[in-house]
Amino acid sequence: MSEHDLPKLIHNARRDYGAEHARLLEELEKTLGISDEKTLTELVVAYEKFEDSSLRLFPGVTDLPKLLIRNKIKMGVVTNGDAFRQWKKLLVLGIADLFDFVAISTAVGIAKPDPQIFQLALDSLAGDPTRSVFVGDRPDLDTKGAKQSGMYTIRVLQGRASNMQPSNRMETADAELTSVDNVGRHLFGP
């Protein structure tokens, strides 16, 4: 194993074991042959610092919630993934407190595109699906589940999923925008 393989190894072990640090360290010990917990923990901490420093918000991500807050509109997050890692991202990026509700698949036991996770968000926010908007980037996970829940869907064509093509009508968003910056104008006008 080379030093270039180490970040991928830690990433995969964290993905598989999430916040279960004891199991994470056991897996790294087994794979790397290092039994010193301090050294293993230092490797994980160094990786996490690197990972945290690489997190970036798209332009407009903080402006949109502020606009919605000014208009007294409730907001939630529906995301797949490990609860520890997803909360950590929201906290590191400084946006966790902007949302009234956060549904993370591993915490609630339902994953996108299952419409139940979107319904959970709607219920928690006392939202009427016909008066609710879901903004996402993936047609297969975000658009499909939100549409099945009766929400208006906006797909933002930014990031890794920007080139994904919808495979059917349920994956085709009601609106496609080139950036989060455009969502406020789309909803409220210029």
Image: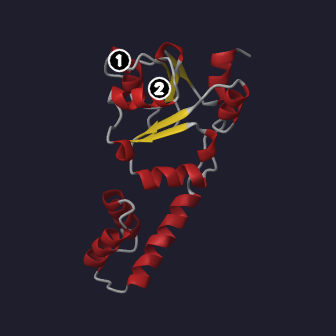
Q: Nearer the viewer, residue 59 or 189?
A: 189
Image quadrant occupied by the C terminus: top right
Element at label 1 = helix
Quarter location, residue 66: top right
Within 10 Å of disc 2 (Cα), the crowding (few <14, some 14-19, many 20+) is: some
Residue 165 can be seen, yes or no: no
Determine the CA span between mark 2 and mark 1: 19 Å
Q: Regarding mark 2 in the picture, which secondary structure is present there?
A: helix
- Give the residue number, with chain letter if any, for mark 1: 170
Residue in the picture at 35% in, 26% down: 115
Instruction: Pick whichever of labels 2 and 1 is earlier in the sequence.
Output: 2
Near-viewer residue (72 or 126): 126
Question: Residue 174, percent across and down?
Answer: 48, 15
Classify 27 as above or below 188.
Answer: below
Residue 46's x, y, as percent?
Answer: 50, 72
The label shown at residue 147 is none
- Between 57 and 86, the residue placed more toward the observer is 86
Q: Is residue 130 above or below residue 43?
A: above
Q: Is residue 45 left or right of residue 10?
A: right
Q: Residue at x 68, y 20 (%)?
A: 185
Residue that carries the numbered disc 2 in the rendered image? 122
Kind of residue at badge 1:
Met
